[in-house]
Amino acid sequence: MTTLQSVPEPGTRPAAGPRQDRAETRDRLSSATYDLLVIGGGILGTSVAWHAAQSGLRVAMVDAGDFAGATSSASSKLVHGGLRYLQTGAVKLVAENHHERRVLAKDVAPHLVNPLTFYLPVYKGGPHGAAKLGAGVFAYSALSAFGDGVGRVISPARAAADNPALRTENLKAVAVFGDHQMNDSRVAVMTVRAAVESGAVVLNHAEVTGLRFTHGRVSGAELRDGLDGTEFGVDARIVLNATGPWVDHLRRMEDSGAAPSIRLSKGAHVVLKRKAPWKAAMSTPVDKYRITFALPWEDQLLLGTTDEAYEGDPGQVRATEADIDQILEEAAFSVRDEHLSRDLITYAYAGLRVLPGGPGNTESAKRETVVTEGRGGMLSVAGGKWTTYRHIGRTVINKLAKLPGGALADDMEPLSRLPRRVPLPGIANPNAVAHRLLVDREPGVRMDPLTARQLATHYGSLSFEIARLVAEDPALGERIHPDGPEIWAQAVYARDHEWAETVDDVLRRRTTLTIRGLDTDEVRARVEELLRR
């Protein structure tokens, strides 16, 4: 592994490029009136900023932490139709989800969204029988126009041959269906980049300390830079509150008497080292509503998830020992014990689902997006998931176009005139990209095949920009940690082109070092030094 002393001057910031100096960005934000200020850079905020900028609006987006720094990078990493929604009769919802899933996988982000086969084991005494699940996965695949094959039932022996970790005791059958998965942090970063390429001005680590009002209407926000404490403000014709679990906190800045509009459900996950190949994910029913996932992801094993009401500080949500115990216990329904040892755990995390307020438990609560307007004219949007995040962005844009008095309609290009399947930056076939990274290289510069594959599936064609950094200085081609595929050029690229400002921005969200358990004190210190250059 290279030392930072051997990471050369490409580690210094470039004179110009996609990444602007924070002071310059603050000046741009504070010296103009924007059509739309989006507060919150998670699933909802990034999608709205992207679509609003495409429609011709002057857009600003800020986040108190990093982009997708909270729940939006703490998901189950799935792009899916929602098989369990069928049991509630939500056929239209599943069909819509499938449509968005196919568009993401084929037209918008084939370099980031990957197909994944699922096994749904049916055990003796389980909550569902083989006939019911077989019919369910067939209907599920039919709603996707059989784009991922035909849902079917296979024998336990065949399933165990593909997944040696599958527990076969009392296993009656295995239902099979297709879905997709992704790296949520990378999708978020690419969406921010797409928004900026469409004209948006963005800044992370910028906390809202108050709202601006003009004649009783919300007309902007006061902010504080979380890195150096600089205070500044942004003026906007419309402010959108897309702060996820903090949505009611911002609503109370608009109206101190605003009643709670949401409730929160915690979903925890555990990441473990893999001891055997996994040719399919496993989705095992726990009860009538809940399932437990065991997903091959980033060469690791991802387990989850919990679903319980959460009433604490959203900023303090964590995967507790009780959460980990529950996840491991539920995973053991279908995964052999030797694959669930605590010694294999590399990381655990938790996020918060934002659900509409109302009675009943969180497991059966509707997963829907709600857009409301406050007494000061601020729009608040809450709820959503990665699979339909483009649809959510379009929904909010339609809401903006229909605001009373045509506040923004005259300045917007109607969505009907805009391309519906705009790709994210870097769109390319990852297999072709990986091949080129290995074949089209400078003399004497060799790229590890694991690194080439990791770059191709996280950056697409933008991988070649990282490869150029390595060509300019081969030391940047050294791995950040010997047990992970990432190289130092990615840390430099994250800082200079992907708004990475802190060590966690680099190791947790721009790369996979943290989830692999490789963010050692030495690695963190070296990345910290790199960020200061």
Image (tube, helix red, strand yellow):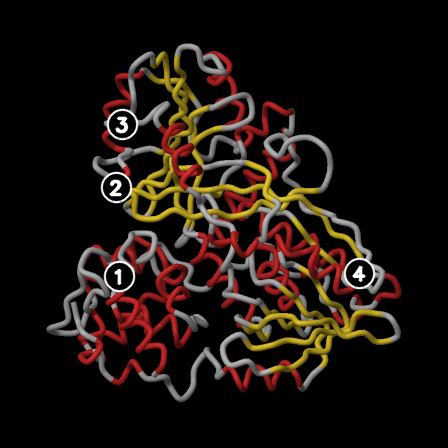
Asked whether, in this view, residue 419 is left or right of residue 8, the answer is right
**Circle 4 Cα neighbour tier, 10 Å, few/some/many (<14 / 14–19 / ≥20):** few
Label 1 element class: loop
Residue 337: mark: 3
What's under tag 4, amino acid-wise? Ser
Q: Secondary structure at mark 4?
A: loop
Residue 187, given in percent of the width and then of the height, sits at 46, 56
- The quadrant of the rendering that contains the N terminus is bottom left
x, y percent for residue 375: 85, 60
Disc 2 to disc 1, how far (Cα)? 16 Å
Q: Earlier in the sequence, mark 4 or mark 3?
A: 4
Q: CA distance from mark 4 to mark 3?
A: 51 Å
Amino acid type shown at disc 1: Thr
Q: Return the mark for residue 344.
A: 2
Dot 2 crowding, Cα within 10 Å, few <14, some 14–19, many 20+: some
Measure how far apart labels 3 and 1 are at the Cα level: 28 Å
Quarter of image, res 180: top left
Q: Quadrant of the C terminus?
A: bottom left
